[in-house]
Amino acid sequence: MSDAAIPPGILIERESANRPNYLNWSHTVKDWLLTSDHKRIAILYLISITFMFGLGGIAAMAIRAELVLPHGHLMESETYNKVFTMHGVVMIFFFLVPSIPATLGNFVLPLMIGARDLAFPRLNLLSWYLYTIGGVISLGAMICGGVDAGWTFYTPYSSIYSNSNISVTLLGLFIAGFSSITTGINFIVTIHKMRAPGLTWMRLPLFVWAHYATSVIIVLGTPVVAVTLGLVLTERLLHIGIFDPAIGGDPILFQHMFWFYSHPAVYIMILPSMGIISEVVACFCRKRVFGYSFVCGSTLAIAGFGFMVWGHHMFITGQSVYTGMIFSALTFIVAVPSAIKVFNWTATIYKGEVVFSAPMIYALGFIGLFTIGGLTGLYCASLTVDVHINMTYFIVAHFHYVMVGGATLGYLAGLHFWWPKMTGRMYPEGWAKLSAGLVFVGFNLTFFPQFILGWLGMPRRYHYYPVEFQTWHVLSTAGATVLAVSYIIPIIYFIWSLKYGEKVGPNPWGAAGLEWTISSPPLPHNFDNLPTVTWEAYNYEVPHADEEVDHSGGIVGDEQPSH
């Protein structure tokens, strides 16, 4: 058997101190800003997205601090609306949507399929510049004067009546949308055309399947929201009646167009996290993912059904009761493929050789929080119940359990899982486990009280509230403080690890997959010789694949085959 055909866990490339890796800090800033290496572009995205996450988090803490008292004490109502909008816009459009595809997807996906780069390297760099330009424009508008329309920009308020910087903000979002589109096109072409020989569709890692489905949603859905934002700008600047009923428009048309993209966008945020959880659970349970083909199918089913359920956001807009019933039924159906994934992860864990490393703790936290978010989503899907809870904090809690508890914990699980591959150094495991535990505790303390608030009738988006709700808001703010600390800790130890972290070899986790057969950090060209794949995904049953791997890259107690 040739080296290139040896299953993962057996073949590990020898590292050489004389071989430059993609980091090569001696390169100038210009080299980084003009790079076409997918790994460096992923690092540029990681820095930018972390900055955006910090800004969105600061806005969130300002909101929680304000809501400690029933009648406000830090901000005027207009300022509160602007901070609220900034939190939503930054977190949705500049963190949650691009976070995993642009960072971990950009870095790992070519390595997973045995490619030396993405199909269009320069287009990949352009996508980062579009993201950065759009972010600078939108942030400038939100900081210099602010935006008060909420992250959904509902018309006709956003298109006619608001005096805040909506036009400039929408321009920034319009530009950033093309960043997502170019990334999606790049991923689709790369997965179709650049897989290693022998890497058939049913041998692909589930992380790749997740990004393929996500990219299809991005390419089909993002142009719709781009057109929608363009129409809002047109009405705002030219006063052409599109959404404003006072000049012949239809405000409900905006909601149809906006949610046709924005509900599939939920899966843009969550599907990549699901792909990460599959990788982590398989690795730390030393098992092939249970029902691999069903998980692949459920990924595509989520992408397909995601375009059919936008109307469940509009049960109280006056749409036909029969239309609402159809959307309600479809929403219940779309829960099925998500449940398949949870059941399959649970079956994979069952009787597995579970190792509770930091990525696995984050993965378990994801499964717990996403399950709560999914089950409470069934209340939102029920037509009669949703009429009562739609505009309450119940929706806020449900949304955050899916998005923050799901997407963010998945992102952190993946970042901890692939950090040694990205940097060649290990973070302090004890601190990482502490952070994972604090995230889970802080998150539940922050958002579970909001389910109770919503059930008691606390409206969402309100600045002032009745005094009887104060205890729950205080608990929520206390949880947000714990959550903030749990997010700051990883930033500190990741930066620390770049200089002081223990050096690791190609496969510190003993994981299966092509990315673990090359050096850590990878070479600029990834592979000296493109591999030929002759094994199934998650081939943990082969000899040595489930044995401990030391940080020098060798399998403990066993001799490596020569390379």
Image: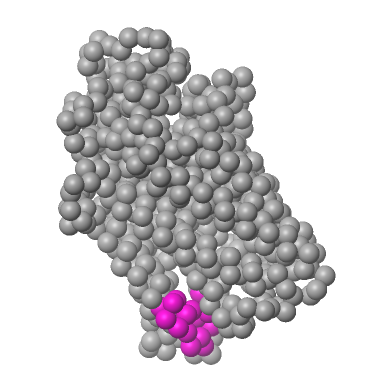
Q: Which residues are magenta?
A: 141-164
Front residue of 531/245: it is: 531
Residue 396 percent coordinates (x, y): 64, 61
Task: Please tell me in which quadrant of the rendered image residue 29 appears.
Answer: bottom left
Residue 221 percent coordinates (x, y): 42, 58
Identify the residue at horizontal 51%, vertical 53% (top origin).
488
Quick check: is 142 in the magenta stretch? yes
Location of the C terminus by quadrant is top left
Q: Residue furthest right?
A: 468
- What is the magenta segment's predominant secondary structure? loop
The figure's colour scheme reads one colour
Identify the residue at horizontal 45%, vertical 15% (top origin).
547
Q: Is residue 196 left or right of residue 400?
A: left
Residue 444 percent coordinates (x, y): 67, 50
Front residue of 560/370: it is: 560
Location of the N terminus by quadrant is top left
